[in-house]
Image (tube, grey):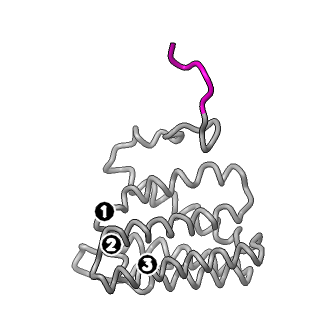
Amino acid sequence: MRGKGTFVSINPGIGKDPLGLYFVAPDQLRGNLEELRLMMEPEIAALAAQKVTDQEAEDLFVIAQDMQKQIDKYSKASGGKKYVQKIMAYDLQFHSLMCNICKNDILDQIFPYIIHNLFDIYASENFQMTLSKPRRINTHLALCEAIRDHDSQKASLLMRRHIMNSRFASASHDSAGQEPSLK
């Protein structure tokens, strides 16, 4: 008899793929997730800046600083998968906390799945390419400051820049090598 008994879930009522992303063609998934992230995360950052408490701002800074320590170790060790995994975990924690700061239960349930799926895609060498870019952590720290200072406009702009930098770094195989525009 399958399906009888008590089942425990971290997120009650939500399966492993609640958004049906396994059914999206792999060659379209990354672009679709990045597009969605670009539409949502700047607004999430702006809302977080409006609702953040002093403790939440401090927690966000701690995560960004811990991430920087791992990036420094990664750089000194000339790479290393264990550092990449830790950095990705901090990055995921950073974006999840920012989402949680918004104090929107629905957003808190949905957005982590989007980020998790995108991080699964970024888990390749593309993520490692971004680790050598100083702007990655600088953007996180500047974003922490904007959120702490309740500057919604700046938080939104910095998040847009952060996403564009990530997209640029992962697509930097082109010969132009130019930064993305924020216009």
- Horizontal side of 31 relative to 4 (left or right) equals left
The residue positioned 37% from the left and 74% from the top of the image is: 168
Image x and y of residue 92, in percent? 51, 64
- Mark 3: amino acid: Gln
- Mark 2: amino acid: Gln
Mark 2 element type: helix
For marks 3 and 1, the one nearer the N-term is: 3
Q: CA distance from mark 3 to mark 1?
A: 18 Å
- Horizontal side of 75 relative to 145 (left or right) equals left
Whether tag 2 and tag 1 are in contact, CB under 8 A, the answer is: yes
Mark 3 element type: helix
Mark 1 element type: loop
- Mark 1: amino acid: Ser
Toward the viewer: 62 or 162? 62
Q: Which residue is mark 1?
A: 124
Q: Which residue is mark 3?
A: 70
- Horizontal side of 4 relative to 126 (left or right) equals right
Image x and y of residue 30, in percent? 38, 55
Q: Which residue is mark 2?
A: 128
Q: CA distance from mark 3 to mark 2?
A: 12 Å
Image x and y of residue 74, in percent? 35, 79
The residue positioned 42% from the left and 86% from the top of the image is: 134
**Farthest top residue in view:** 1
Q: CA distance from mark 2 to mark 1?
A: 7 Å
Q: Where are the magenta residues, as a range? A: 1-7
In the rendered image, the vertical position of residue 35 relative to residue 46, given as above or below: above
